[in-house]
Image (spheres, rainbow, N blue to C red):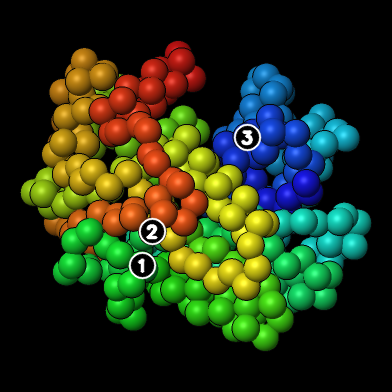
Amino acid sequence: MNYLVTGGSGFIGSHLVEQLLKDGHFVINIDNFDDFYDYQIKVKNTLESVGLSSDFDFTEKDTDILKLIEKTNSENYKLYYTDIRDKESLNQIFKNHKIDVLVHLAALAGVRPSIERPLDYEEVNIKGTMNLWELCKEFEVKKNVIASSSSVYGNNEKIPFSEADNVDRPISPYAATKKCTEILGHVYHHLYGLDMIFLRFFTVFGPRQRPDLAIHKFTKLISENQEIPFYGDGSTARDYTFINDIVDGIVKSIAFVEGNKNVYETINLGESQVITLNEMLSGIEAELGKTALKRNLPIQPGDVQKTNADINKAQNLINYLPKTNYQNGIKIFVEWFLRNNK
């Protein structure tokens, strides 16, 4: 099968690309190597995802990415350095390839940055997504799997969070853009017959995790004997989900949308185990053998108090069953971090 993966050089995307290639598929990766964080990380992700050494002679961004394209493109993998806001560029990609399934992971991510840059989030996450769907409509790419987020639940009072819960009260621009794409997706499903599964990811972690996310940031700062920013009293809690389980859920969602007609579904992909901020930190400290130096700060605007996924629908619909709990996952992550930061 031919899969178009947007954001295929990011944290989740690179792991998905790696799995799809192992399964013998042809993968088209669209990534803009955004400066949200160091583009060199995405270069290394890309190399690893196609089975190449992450060693790379870096010089200058545009030159490096052109070198990367030349190095990685093969008979079963094609990398495009472009932006989902650039419809003309996307149009050429759709023209050049027969696409069986669109797996749309590209987005501006993060709750706190979205409060500072709301219009950028609207432009990328909503307009960029609609560009893709307009082309899916034109080129009859009927099958779609799209990344949403547990952020859409806001401060949902009912625990665990179910797909049937009302999510009309987001508390950050990021969450609002994700909810908006779910609604717009139904329009394209209803009018043009695009089959869609939206996946609400719950706090994904593991090797290649973005450096701005708490687990990676804490691990780095503690290992360097620096203070960590510690928001609130440590009682906030998250449903931490290991990357391998997320990729398994995406692959099973692809199979479901390929094998069924008239699909419009929203699915939680979480672990269903709630870990407090204090527990998260203790796990990192134990694996590093170090105690964190904490700089206590107030809760940040847009942060939710707790996330917890009801995964019954995912279990019933796609046979999703997470296998790696936080304790085992953090051990794997810290081992990866130490190997890559010698």
* Residue 308 appears in the figure: yes
**Looking at the picture, how far across and down is residue 2, in whole percent?**
78, 48
- Between label 1 and label 2, give the one nearer the viewer: 2
Check residue 234 in the rendering and tell me which mark sits there, or answer none: none
| Residue farthest toward the left in the current orientation of the protein | 233
How far apart, in angstroms, are the residues tagged by discs 2 and 3? 24 Å
The residue sitting at 30% across, 33% down in the picture is 325
Q: In the rendering, which numbered label is found on residue 19?
A: 3
User: Of the residues under marks 1 and 2, which one precedes in the sequence?
Assistant: 1
Is 8 situated above or below 6?
above
Give residue 150's position: percent from left, percent from top. Answer: 36, 60
Q: Quarter holding the C terminus?
A: top left
The residue shown at (68%, 51%) is: 5
Q: How many residues crowd mark 3 within 10 Å: few (<14), some (14–19), many (20+)? A: some
Q: Is residue 3 above or below residue 143?
A: above
Residue situated in front as seen by the camera: 222 or 189: 189
Q: How many marks?
A: 3
Instruction: Say whether residue 208 is left or right of residue 65.
Output: left
Determine which quarter of the picture holds residue 57: top right
Q: Amino acid at mark 3?
A: Gln
Residue drawn at (90%, 62%) of the image = 95
Write down the residue under mark 1.
163
Q: Secondary structure at mark 3?
A: helix
**Label annotation for residue 313:** 2
Q: Could you say whether the residue bearing mark 2 is in a helix, strand or loop? A: helix
Kind of residue at disc 2: Lys
Residue 337, image x and y in percent? Answer: 42, 23
Where does the image place residue 56, in percent across and percent down from the top left? 69, 23
Contact, mark 2 vs mark 3 (Cβ under 8 Å): no
Q: Is residue 321 above or below residue 206?
A: below
Please tell me whether mark 1 sits on a helix, a strand or a loop: loop
Q: Are marks 1 and 2 in contact (CB under 8 Å)?
A: yes
